[in-house]
Image: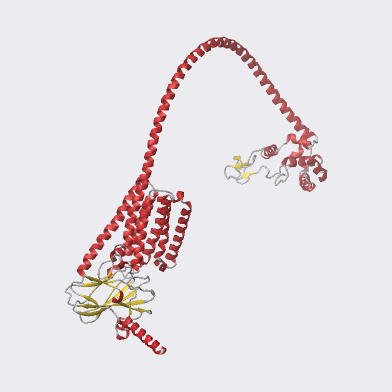
Amino acid sequence: MLRKVINRLVYFFIFFSAHQVIAQQVVNIDTNTKEHIFVNKEIVCLEDINRNLTIEEVKSAAYQDKFIANKDFYPKNYNRKAAYWYRIKVRFNEKLGHSAIIEFFDQITDHVEAYLPDENGNYVKSKAGADLSFRERSFHHKNFQFLINTDKKGEYFYYFRVESKDQVNVIIVFRTVERFIGYALSEYIMFGFFYGMIVIFSFHNLLMFLAVRRRQYLFYILYVLSVGMFEMSTDGIAFQYLWPNQPVWNEYAYGVSLFFLSTFGLIFTKELLHVKIKAPKINTVINLLIIIRLIYFLVCLFYNTDWFKYKFLEFIPLSLCFFTGIYIWWKKQYGPARFFVLGYFFLSLGFIIKIVHILGWSRLFIGNVVGYYSLSFGFLLEMVFLSFAIGDQVRILRRKKENARKQIIKQMQVNAELKDNINKELEDKVVVRTKEVQQKSAELQQKNITIEHQNEELLSKNTLLEHQAEEISRMNILLEKDNINLKTNIEKVREARVNATEVDFEEFSLKYPDKDSCYKFLADMKWENGYACIKCSNTSYCNGKVPFNRRCTKCAYEESVLHDTIFENNRIPINKAFYLVYLMYNHKGAISSHKLSERIGIRQSTCWTYASKVKKVMEDRKKDIKGSGKSGWSKLIINK
């Protein structure tokens, strides 16, 4: 018994399902029908997963039962990798007597093929879509229109093949040509009003930016232009008028315009509401969101443009702007934020209504027109209230400026009163001070007389002092001459002593105390017969980088004062090297390196090396230094 009940339920379910599959509601059209939108059971669909079905196969009896009833108010292509066939059934109750069209609304649909029967029952193919250039359309309109080939009385099946990378609402509408013309004109007038408002807002704020140079006006212009570009891309107006021969740009238009819309919206929010000052944490969140949005945009642009379809992500920056406005209005009591909040309230409301319309629920409580254009209305109201917010901010700034001006005027009045009081006090003090000055002047006059007598005495004394100064000056000149002669005699005595006897290093250092004195001695000896460049033989020179070096004025070669002397490549202090040569010469090369090290204060090994070098030179120049006395050590210095 239970098995029979189950079998009957199964048979009933199969029968009911089959009835749902093949059942399709017929749409009756007569001469009074100007427009009809196909919804629900008036549309059946077939999913072509491999996208290889032809119209002959689809309209054949084998595929008629494979069409399923539409489960949504408007059909959608849930599987974006497949093609979808849609079928509508129309009954003309009488000959229409006028032309009519079938129109598709969603402008982002990539490819639409319409198969409409003619008077002979043959299906005529027409195609349209966002992937085709605009001039290939039958009607130069932003939507997709297909002309009905016959208006005779009877029942007709219309087939439509739809492919799209994005999920679209397949909104199919029957319209008479007269109705289409009236509707299109009204719609384009509305577009002209909407985009005209965008141009007016942009131009007005451009003038404001040029006048006051506030960045918020510039970002508002960029935001409004981004809104306009997004709406033009969504409505198909941009494709129609901006790039009609480049349909590939339709793949980027939405994503690019949405990126600029959300980015400039966030930046404008920061500038208008002074978020950096009033809410630093929210400002950090906004900056972070801008960076994330930029990264996502670049990934979509260069990696996968298919990700541009996730438009619902723009609800995040929209919500953040809305929250920022509420916070600054509620917490910071910033007046212009109230208009900002109202603008984003209407934009959010338009966004929600648009979603409801896409889901097909807008017909329950609002009209299709309001639902379809809700986001545009929201943007328009938002722009109006944002303009109010900017104007309110300007009004507040003007009021602050006026208050500041009044405060300045008031302060200037106070300053003037203070100035008058001070001047009066100063005048009184001047009178008192004048009397004091007159009294002091009389006293000073008496003192001046006394000072004049004293000056006469000083003049006489100064004359005497001048004579004494002249005598002292004459004596100083004589003393200076004596000092010069004395100094010269001391120098000669010292040189004679150095050359005459062996002296210790301290006494030797009086003659050659430092590097400069040694270099000067070498220079005088080396070039006592005149300078000649060793490279080019030029006789003109200038000072080199190192003191006492000489640089050729012709070839710029700089010759070191140590070059071609026994001290070339010297690594010990030059005055000690002088003393070492002096000792070696006085002892005729017989002094030991240990003794040299003790007297000069240099390591024994270094003294041995230098002593060997000097001893070799002495042997080579025995004839030259023979009979030179104690001063012959200087003849060992210059190499021959």
Task: Find residue 124 and report its horizontal and vertical position in percent.
Answer: 25, 78
The reply, left or right, for residue 482 in relation to residue 368 is right
Q: Please give the name of the residue rendered at 46% of the width and 48% of the height, measured from the top-left corner.
A: 277
Task: Find residue 33 and report its horizontal and vertical position in percent.
Answer: 20, 72
| Residue 475 visible in the displayed image | yes
Q: Quadrant of residue 72?
A: bottom left
Task: Find residue 305 and report its horizontal and vertical position in percent.
Answer: 41, 67
The reply, left or right, for residue 130 in relation to residue 558 is left
Q: Please give the name of the residue rendered at 24% of the width and 60% of the height, measured from the top-left corner.
A: 189
Residue 529, placed above or below residue 8:
above
Q: Please give the name of the residue rendered at 44% of the width and 60% of the height, measured from the top-left corner.
A: 293
Q: Quadrant of residue 503?
A: top right
Question: Is 400 or 6 nearer to us in this picture?
Answer: 6
Residue 96, placed above or below residue 310:
below
- The image's colour scheme reads secondary structure
| Residue 57 visible in the displayed image | no
Quick one: quadrant of the N terminus?
Answer: bottom left
Quick one: quadrant of the C terminus?
Answer: top right
Q: Quadrant of residue 512?
A: top right
Q: How many marks?
A: 0
Question: Is 301 or 399 nearer to us in this picture?
Answer: 399
Q: Please give the name of the residue rendered at 38% of the width and 37% of the height, measured from the top-left corner.
A: 405
The reply, left or right, for residue 497 in relation to residue 553 is right
Task: Find residue 419 and report its horizontal and vertical position in percent.
Answer: 42, 26
Question: Is 66 or 184 nearer to us in this picture?
Answer: 66
Residue 245, placed above or below residue 266:
below
